[in-house]
Structures are given as C-alpha cells and as structure tokens.
Image (cartoon, helix red, strand yellow):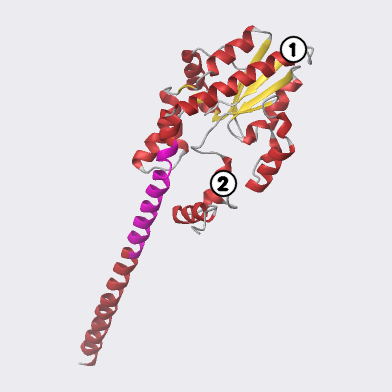
Amino acid sequence: MKKPILQGIGAAIILALAGCAAPQQGAQQQSTQSQQSMQQQAQQQLAGQSVLAVNWFQQSGEYQALAWQAFNSARLAFDASAHKVKGRRAVIVDLDETMLDNSAYSAWQAKHGQPFSDKTWSAWTQAKQAVAVPGAVQFARYVNSHGGTMFYISNRDAKDSAATKANLEALGFPGVNEKTLLLKTDSSNKQARFDSVKASGYHVVLYIGDNLNDFGAATYHKDNAARRQFVSDNHARFGTELIVLPNPLYGDWESGMAPGYFKLTPEQKLQVRENNLRAWSGQ
C-alpha cells in the first residue's frame, strides 16, 4: 500500500504547487497589463502635449507670416549672391516642414495618441497629401527661373521617392528629378549629400530648413547645449546663408534634451520634458 500512498502524496504536492503557481502567473500578467496601460497613458499624454503646437501651426496667421518672412529673406539673399558668386548657384532645401506641410500627420498622432513610426509615416508619404508651406513654391520657382537650381535634400526614405516627387510636382515645385531630389539611402546625416552637390560643380549659396541638421554635420547627434552654441557661433549667417522655418511639432531639439532620448519609455520621455522646463518660482 505504500506506492499508492506515495502517489497520492505526490499528486497532492503537484496540485499544491500548481495552486501556488496560478496566483503568481496571474499576478505577473496583471503587472504586465498594468505596465502596458501606464505606457499607453503616457504615450497619449506625450501626443496630447503637441495639440497646441499643431493648432498654432495650422491656424495662426503668425506661422504663415514667419514662413513668408523666411522666404522673402531667402529671395533677398539669393539675389545678393549673384554679385558674390560666379558659376552655377544652388539652393539646398529640406522638405518636411520647410517646403512641405505635414501637420495633418502630426494632428493624426495627437488625435489617436500615436508615436511617430516609419510605417505610419511612409503611409502618410504615399498618400501624397502634404501641402506647400506658404511662400515655398513661389521661392523655388524664382530660384529656378533666375539662374539657380533647387536641390531638395530630405531624410524621407528613398523608397518613398516616387510618391514624394509626385506630391511636389502636384504642388507646383519646379525641377524635381533624380539629380535634385536626394532622399535618405543610408544615413540621416545630410553632409555627404550636400558635398555631392558641391562636387558636381555648384556653389551652394543658401541652405533652408527647420532643423539645424539641415545646415550640415556640425549639430548632428549633438545635445541642445552644442546646438545653441552652433547658433551663437554662426549668428551672422542666419538670414543671409542659413534660413530657418519655424517647427514646434518635432525635431532634433527634442532628442537633444537627453542622451538616448528616443530609446526611453513614454514615462521617461515625459519626465525629461518636465525636467527641461525653466519655470518661474511663483514668488
């Protein structure tokens, strides 16, 4: 009779262990679900923080005025370059939030609490629904009809080249072809593409963008202290060689707030944003 007794004892132990494991597994599952819920809430909060910026970008006359101001200054600078440069003149421009307004994508993110992703961004690009930034088409046409060549250098993925070209042409941008539309193939550092324009015999007289990285490698993957120092060191060039468009929606200034920013959890990103506020003491 010993064997059945032992078997009974073994079965009881197994049942006891299973009974202990079930609550543990349930607790772990609840913990995972709780963490996921907290991350989703944090992501929604991150996206929600951009609502007012999107409102300003889409609704304010001030944004439109700043865009026109940038391109009016760019035209004056381009005209002045004719007296300084002999040979073929090039103007290098970024696309997104410089020549193309993608704020509808940012509005979609805000409404649905969604982070940026390559998949959804590519879907937006393929939809070809970006509109022109105020003054952008007029400036591009002016350059190409007054002895210059526009080069559209963007970190859109090269696989979206055809859709980007179609979108630009539908809006009336001139001279968009395989030589002037240079999208990202390997690196988001644009310096090599800038250098290729110069190597082909052009004098670059103007850089236009919404991100300091649109002016070269000097600020690439640098923190905001280094980015501000670049501005200080080059302040005399802004408005004459470097033209900046306003973009409060996104940019490398965001990742410049903390090392490895884009690898942080939504909760950590919220904390970084909070920590980078310079607030009045209230006294």
Label 2 sits on residue: 255
Where does residue 241 sit, x and y in percent of width and height?
Answer: 70, 25
Of callouts 2 and 1, the N-terminal one: 1
Residue 36 figure quarter: bottom left
Percent across and percent down for residue 35 are 37, 60
Q: Is residue 46 magenta?
A: yes
Residue 157 percent coordinates (x, y): 54, 30
Residue indicated by mark 1: 82
Give the magenta range: 31-53
Return the residue nearer the eye: 157 or 203: 203
Q: How many marks?
A: 2
Mark pair 2, 1: CA separation: 38 Å
**Residue at the (58%, 50%) spot, across then down:** 257
Q: Is residue 69 left or right of residue 111?
A: right
Between residue 28 and residue 180, name the one nearer to us.
Answer: 180
- Tell me the kind of residue under disc 2: Ser
